Image: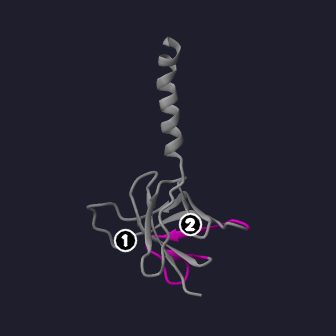
Amino acid sequence: MLRITRLLPLILLTGCAASATQMQTPPPNDAAHPLTVTLPIGGQYLLSDGGKITYLQLINDSRCPPNVQCIWAGDAEVELRWQPAKGRPTTFSLHTNPTQDTSSNNFTLGSLRTTLKDLERGIAPKATLQISTVSP
């Protein structure tokens, strides 16, 4: 009995660590009801079509700091990877303040569109994505 009580904290901690890395899987969405999901760097989201999206990294963040008056708001760029249910993965980036010709805050993944809605501040900011269905 003494041996089991010594192992119990280790078993409980192992269970907590496993649940922290699980993939987010919200309910299905449609064009009228887009889903919003917030991911940490390395976080994954299971798409309704069986694919998954992973937030890989913060590439750049030149946004104006809070409580500072800037001439330009700046921009932050995050890198994501879409792994379809079948086929090769696609890596793409999204911006908080896209320019008309060179960047975007959304990307179409098959029948789903992913839009960067918000990005926290800091070294490893969480990204808030909106996922909606695109009509063919």
- Is residue 65 left or right of 113 when viewed as pictured? left
Secondary structure found at label 2:
loop
**Amino acid type shown at disc 1:** Ala
Residue range corresponding to the magenta coloring:
87-109
Viewer-proximal residue among 121 and 48: 48
User: Is 90 covered by the magenta stretch?
Assistant: yes
The structure residue drawn at horizontal position 62% and vertical position 66%, both measured from the top left corner, is: 50
Q: CA–CA distance between discs 2 and 1?
A: 32 Å
Q: Secondary structure at mark 1?
A: loop
Residue 45, relative to residue 94: is it above or below?
above
Within 10 Å of disc 1 (Cα), the crowding (few <14, some 14-19, many 20+) is few
Q: Which mark is residue 50?
A: none
**Residue at 53% over, 46% down:** 21
Q: Residue furthest front?
A: 1
Rendered residue at 47%/54% (across/down): 40
Please give the name of the residue rendered at 48% of the width and 31% of the height, measured from the top-left corner: 12
* Residue 130 magenta: no
Image: 4 above or below 38: above
| Place of residue 23 in the rendered image (x, y in percent of width and height, measured from the top left) | 54, 54
**110 relative to 20, above or below:** below
Tell me which numbered mark, 2 or 1, is placed earlier along the sequence: 2
Position of the C terminus, as image quadrant, is bottom right
Residue 96 spot, x, y in % from top left: 44, 70
Q: Residue furthest bottom?
A: 136
Which of the two residues, 68 or 104, is positioned nearer the viewer here?
104
Instruction: Choose mark 2 or mark 1, whichever is in front.
Output: 2
Q: Residues within 10 Å of mark 2 (few under 14, many from 20)?
A: many
Instruction: Look at mark 1 in the image and give the residue it sits on.
Output: 73
Left or right of 126, for residue 87: right
Mark 2, residue position: 47
Q: Is residue 4 above or below residue 101?
A: above
